[in-house]
Amino acid sequence: MRESWGSRFGFIMATVGFAVGLGNIWRFPYMVGENGGGAFLIVYIACAVLIGIPLFTAEISLGRKTQLTPIAGMAKLTGSSTHPWNVVGWLGTIVNVMILSYYTMILGWVVSYFIQIVTGRFSGIPTHEIQATFDTFVAKPLPVLGYVSLVLVVIGVLVARGVQEGIERVAKIAMPLLFVMLLVLVARSLSFPGAARGLTWYLKPDFSALTGQTVLAALGQAFFSIGIGMSAAFGLGSYLHRDKSDIPGNAAIVVACDTCVAFLAGLMIFPALFAFGLEPDSGPGLLFVTMTNLFNRMPAGQFFGGAFFFLLILAGLTSAMAQIEVLVATLLDSFRITRKQGVAIVCTGLFLLAIPNVLSQGPWSHIQAFGKDIFVLVDTLSGNFLLVASGLALAAYTAFAWGWERFRDETNVGAGRLKVFPWWKPFIKYIIPIAVAVILLGGLGVF
């Protein structure tokens, strides 16, 4: 018998846990920093609300309808394992695996930095040595792979416990704690003299800086952060009872929480950076170099730095757990194996896939394509292009194959006050598929 969620709160917290991850607190700030601040923020929020909520709703609804994971679920809907529309399930699963291949590496970095900060490793170190320390750490494959294996073992043990005893139980504790910690850190950041400059830079838009690449990056970040087109929402939705779940309401809550955390992450980081005269456009190393430097220079920095990186661990673990849960469930839907066997296969496979990303920061740093090392290339390809393409496939299937009426009727079963209203129709049928396609093609330089 297929498992199900123990409560609505448990499903919402688990799904928020999936959506709220390193994409919000690690990736979002450096994307804002690299794309000029306020204008990127506004485009990101617009994408999350106008495109994110309807597509996230559709993905969860497909999972509930099929009671299966994406690959098996799409085969059930199309009636064939080779139907072209099965690309919705396959592409989402591939993107999920690609993201996890480096996500576990980043989470390993976070665990290492948490340990180093709480033990005082960075106390009194000059700024240039913090950068050198980061470069030295990521360039040594064996210690990083050790942390990656630790992360995967912890996640594997938790996922092996099942849906209710694993991801649901962890998320119900971790998510409220994460929000409280984030608010404390935001309050501390805004209290620094000079923080207003960072707040202005973050919130005041400069629309002259917007380009097709910037808009694509904002849409890709919204998809990455919410988890659209990553197969996980489909899989998590498959554990819902058809007549006892409010999909539109739940989806709106999850997207609102996810967007709120991303926004608060910016409020936490940028005012503090400007207050201490640090640069916001530091790329993927923003949290590990710039933030470590920041905590090293602020009063009680060791305490707040430890709290910050512990927050990152919570966010990363809950998100990775949900993604890995869906991959494990995909194996269970397709093969006659036990949950523990599925966990072992997935975690072992992800460890092997993490190796090239880890090596690309050290011994393989000379291996590049399009001017990017393996890790940055996989991040860009999966986060900015394939994830958006997966979302486009989901939007197209919902609009043209599933159809407006069937989507509306299925999704509104069990819905509360927030339903799929008639005004959603032009968004589902025309605006979202066209907008996603135009943004993707524009980002690719087609026009």
Image (tube, rainbow, N blue to C red):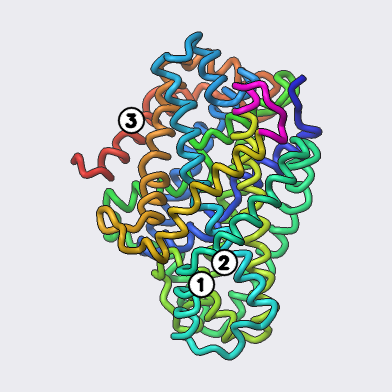
Q: Which of 105 and 216 lies nearest the eye of the viewer?
A: 105
Mark number displayed over residue 434: 3
Mark number displayed over residue 143: 2
Please tell me how crowded label 2 is: few (under 14), some (14-19), or many (20+) other residues with Cα within 10 Å: some
User: Residue 300: x percent and y percent?
Assistant: 68, 84
Report the Cα–Cα distance between label 2 and label 3.
Answer: 46 Å
To which residue does mark 1 refer? 137
Residue 50 appears in the rendering: no
* Quarter of the figure with residue 343: top right
Report the Cα–Cα distance between label 1 and label 3.
Answer: 44 Å
What amino acid type is highlighted by mark number 1?
Phe
Residue closest to the far top: 79
Are the two marked residues, 2 and 1, in contact with CB atoms closer than 8 angstroms?
Answer: yes
* Residue span colored magenta: 331-341
Mark earlier in primary sequence (1, 3): 1
Q: Is residue 115 above or below residue 212?
A: below
Q: Which of 212 and 70 lies nearest the eye of the viewer?
A: 70
